[in-house]
Image (cartoon, rainbow, N blue to C red):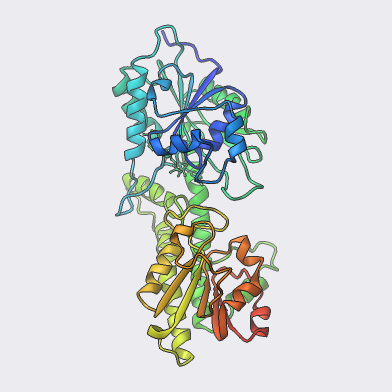
């Protein structure tokens, strides 16, 4: 006889990273919540009030009811378990499910110790993955480790994370959250539970696979759209046409959707498409369009370095002699995260090509070779605005000052005014 499904009174979030910590903090305002992480240093830091990801303030952590621990036994009797562990890719761009596997193993082994009178828990995955992963890969691991049957003695759910970190407008509270469950009843409970924190509402997908697929295509679409604009920028560069002006003109048509060319990094947009292409290959389909977009976005750092080399050589300078400053190393603006950052790849390629390459990023001083630039301004032959942190885009004059007269300002994302640069007798280039 299956245990009844009830609205949870206790939540455990497994993995307190970028996704897990804000989620756990939000749930702790409504339900008894514990955050579990295997990283001892991370838990020690959080218990001391420090979030290395700068998502939660010291005051927020100090005042929270959230309990944080590395002791997995907190999972055993939880009603609602949410998994937010990373889902990266391997070196050959295949889904790396090792962290999901270890989280499922821990959860399953803890469920063996569950009190006899406790109801069936709901286990909801938030980690981005391919359609089918929750039920066909994760569920069986938990069954094996727990000795309990999915759909009877525990239930699965999936609710993808879609907030945009570093973006104050699109938060857990303001975006609609897609939810799903192994059965209609479970889906309803998952929805009601998330509705406690997702103020904008929940969208109940018909099943788990649909919810998984919906998440992955959000990032596939973004990756492809940016890839198209990157490819257009490369084509127009060869034709000596300014691509931003082409996009501006085309945008006057009612159904033209404008995107910005640029570097596509991080652990979502450049990674998630490979989860879909893997799943497509499993059903015998070669996802050519998706992979073509990936290939274009991957080659952008090399294209930019080649372009800078060309512009330097055209000005009669020897690339091996020039000094370059790269501004920004994170995977996007105003965040501290440099995982899979294409700006890091760009700086590495530049190091191999140009005379001297300095790096500055206020968000990650440890990656900066010039941490005191503000006090100690030097002038470079080339300044590359790789990541348009607000601190940079709000200070275009400062960027101009860092560049020698007749030097080159390479503004990858078009964050500063070209006229201002030209008025100060520096050359300007953007994608
Ligand atoms: N960061 C984002 O912007 C974002 C947005 C949407 C979706 N996602 C997805 O959310 C998932 C998590 O991403 P993230 O950026 O929060 O990752 P993260 O690396 O910031 O955090 C993951 C945490 O999980 C912990 N962990 C790893 N294995 C564990 C285990 N077995 N048990 C307990 N804890 C474990 C790690 O120590 C780490 O603290 C990924 O699937 C990602 O694709 C991320």
Taking the view exactly as shown, the residue that stands out farthest to the bottom is 316
Q: Quadrant of residue 61?
A: top right
Q: Residue at x 66, y 71 (%)?
A: 248
How many discs mark residues in the rendered view? 0
Q: Give the camera-side residue of 283 and 362.
A: 362
Residue 324: % across, % down = 47, 77
Q: As rendered, which of 323 and 141 lies closer to the eye? A: 323
Of residue 384 and residue 400, the one placed in the foreground of this image is: 400
The quadrant the N terminus occupies is top left
> From what the image shows, is residue 69 above or below residue 174?
above
Relative to 75, say whether 272 is above or below. Answer: below
**For residue 365, side relative to residue 203 (left or right):** left
Decide if residue 205 is in sight here.
no
Q: Which residue corresponds to the image point at 47% horizontal and 40% vertical from the top-left?
A: 17
User: Could you say which is closer to the camera, residue 187 or residue 166?
Assistant: 166
Residue 206 percent coordinates (x, y) = 53, 31
User: Which x, y percent locates residue 301?
Assistant: 43, 69
């Amino acid at each position: 006889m299956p245990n009844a499904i009830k609205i949870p009174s206790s939540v455990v979030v497994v993995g307190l990273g970028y996704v897990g910590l804000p989620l756990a903090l939000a749930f702790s305002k409504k339900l008894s919540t514990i955050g579990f992480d295997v990283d001892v240093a991370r838990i020690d830091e959080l218990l001391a009030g420090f979030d290395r990801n700068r998502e939660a303030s010291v005051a927020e952590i100090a005042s929270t009811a959230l309990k944080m621990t590395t002791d997995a036994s907190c999972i055993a009797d939880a009603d609602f378990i949410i998994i937010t562990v990373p889902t990266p890719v391997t070196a050959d761009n295949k889904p790396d499910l090792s962290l999901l596997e270890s989280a499922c193993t821990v959860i399953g082994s803890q469920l063996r110790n569950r009190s006899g009178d406790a109801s069936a828990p709901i286990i909801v995955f938030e980690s981005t993955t391919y359609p089918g992963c929750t039920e066909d890969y994760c569920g069986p691991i938990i069954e094996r480790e727990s000795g309990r049957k999915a759909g009877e003695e525990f239930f699965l759910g999936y609710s993808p994370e879609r907030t945009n970190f570093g973006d104050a407008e699109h938060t857990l509270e303001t975006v609609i959250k897609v939810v799903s469950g192994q059965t209609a009843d479970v889906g309803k409970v998952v929805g009601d539970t998330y509705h406690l924190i997702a103020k904008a509402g929940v969208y109940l997908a018909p099943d788990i696979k649909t919810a998984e697929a919906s998440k992955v295509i959000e990032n596939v679409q973004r990756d492809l759209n940016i890839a198209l604009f990157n490819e257009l920028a490369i084509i127009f560069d060869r034709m000596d046409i300014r691509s931003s002006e082409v996009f501006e003109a085309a945008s006057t048509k009612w159904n033209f959707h404008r995107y910005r060319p640029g570097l596509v990094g991080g652990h979502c947009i450049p990674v998630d498409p490979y989860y879909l292409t893997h799943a497509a290959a499993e059903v015998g389909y070669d996802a050519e369009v998706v992979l073509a977009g990936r290939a274009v976005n991957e080659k952008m750092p090399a294209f930019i370095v080649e372009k800078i080399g060309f512009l330097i050589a055209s000005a009669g300078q020897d690339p091996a002699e020039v000094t370059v400053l790269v501004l920004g190393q994170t995977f996007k603006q105003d965040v501290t995260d440099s995982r899979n950052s294409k700006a890091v790849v760009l700086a590495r390629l530049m190091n191999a090509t140009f005379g001297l390459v300095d790096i500055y990023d206020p968000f990650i001083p440890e990656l900066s070779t010039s941490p005191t630039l503000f006090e100690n301004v030097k002038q470079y032959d080339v300044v590359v605005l790789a990541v348009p942190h607000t601190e940079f885009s709000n200070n275009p004059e400062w960027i101009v000052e860092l560049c020698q007269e007749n030097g080159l300002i390479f503004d990858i994302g078009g964050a500063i005014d070209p006229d201002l640069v030209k008025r100060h007798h520096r050359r300007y280039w953007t994608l």
